[in-house]
Image (tube, rainbow, N blue to C red):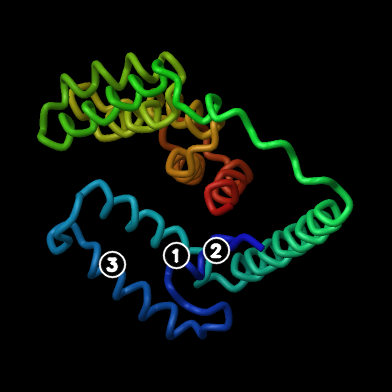
């Protein structure tokens, strides 16, 4: 059975952890990923801090925590049912024919897109935001989910372009709908805070759940 990503996992605590442990874990993670102390990628530090803040807000609130626990049980029940059905199918169905090896090879266009994306990522990491933005925009308009997310981040932070939360939300939405978990999480934050979009706790909860799956 696949693991379910929960707020407990984000804070690295057990599901029966008391409030004192949750507070201690939150404080420790905030210190570890503080922008002035974290030695890694600042974007990664910011992503983790946002995740930790969101998880702490849920687990420190008894009502929200109870709701999250109920959601966990629901997801585990669904997975258990899916696993049981899968085992039954394995016992009754013949093994599928091996796929054509040619299908496993990446298409040239996809390979080129990934190479362009990595180049843009490297450029942005070196502070060459204008060049990175141009490549991200080109890929994003072609439907590249990771480029859509990164373009959203640039609008969110005002890198090379004027800060525009509405544009950030637009690109997060496109990437989120393609299953990009980072975009799903950032989109949830926007709905929770009302930045660039009407505040909507229901949609925020929906996208938090999608990001955690």
- Quarter of the image for residue 135 reads top left
Relative placement, left or right, of 21 versus 133 is right
x then y, percent, for residue 60: 50, 72
User: Mark 3 or mark 2, which is nearer to you?
Assistant: 2
- Residue annotated with mark 3: 30
x 20%, y 50%: residue: 41
- State the separation of the CA atoms marked 2 and 1: 7 Å
Element type at mark 2: loop
Pointer 1: residues within 10 angstroms few (<14), some, or many (20+)?
some
Pointer 2: residues within 10 angstroms few (<14), some, or many (20+)?
many
x 37%, y 23%: residue: 111
Q: Earlier in the sequence, mark 3 or mark 1?
A: 1
- Residue annotated with mark 2: 6
- Quarter of the image for residue 121 reads top left
Q: Earlier in the sequence, mark 3 or mark 2?
A: 2
x then y, percent, for residue 124: 18, 32
Element type at mark 1: helix
Kindly give the residue lying farthest to the right in the view shown.
92
- Quarter of the image for residue 95 reads top right
| Labels 2 & 1 near each other (Cβ < 8 A) | yes
Relative placement, left or right, of 27 versus 211 is left
x then y, percent, for residue 87: 80, 59
- State the separation of the CA atoms marked 3 and 2: 18 Å
Image mark for residue 138? none
In front here: 50 or 129?
A: 129
* 97 versus 201 height, above or below: above
x 23%, y 26%: residue: 120
- State the separation of the CA atoms marked 3 and 1: 12 Å
- Residue annotated with mark 1: 10
In front here: 201 or 139?
A: 139
* 14 versus 66 height, above or below: below
């Amino acid at each position: 059975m696949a693991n379910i990503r929960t707020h407990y996992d984000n804070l690295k605590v057990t599901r029966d952890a008391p409030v004192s442990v949750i507070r201690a874990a939150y404080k420790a993670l905030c210190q570890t990923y503080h922008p002035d102390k974290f030695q890694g990628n600042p974007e990664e530090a910011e992503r983790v801090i946002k995740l930790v803040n969101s998880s702490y807000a849920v687990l420190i609130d008894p009502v929200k925590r109870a709701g999250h626990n109920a959601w966990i049980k629901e997801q585990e029940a669904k997975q258990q049912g899916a696993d049981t059905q899968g085992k039954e199918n394995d016992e009754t169905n013949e093994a599928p024919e091996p796929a054509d090896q040619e299908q496993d090879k990446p298409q040239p266009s996809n390979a080129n897109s990934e190479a362009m994306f990595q180049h843009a990522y490297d450029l942005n990491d070196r502070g060459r935001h204008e060049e990175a933005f141009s490549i991200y925009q080109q890929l994003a308009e072609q439907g590249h989910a990771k480029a859509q997310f990164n373009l959203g981040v640039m609008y969110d932070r005002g890198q090379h372009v004027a800060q525009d939360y509405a544009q950030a939300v637009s690109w997060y939405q496109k990437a989120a709908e393609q299953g990009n978990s980072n975009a799903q999480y950032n989109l949830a934050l926007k709905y929770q805070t009302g930045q660039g979009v009407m505040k909507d706790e229901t949609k925020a909860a929906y996208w938090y759940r999608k990001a955690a799956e």
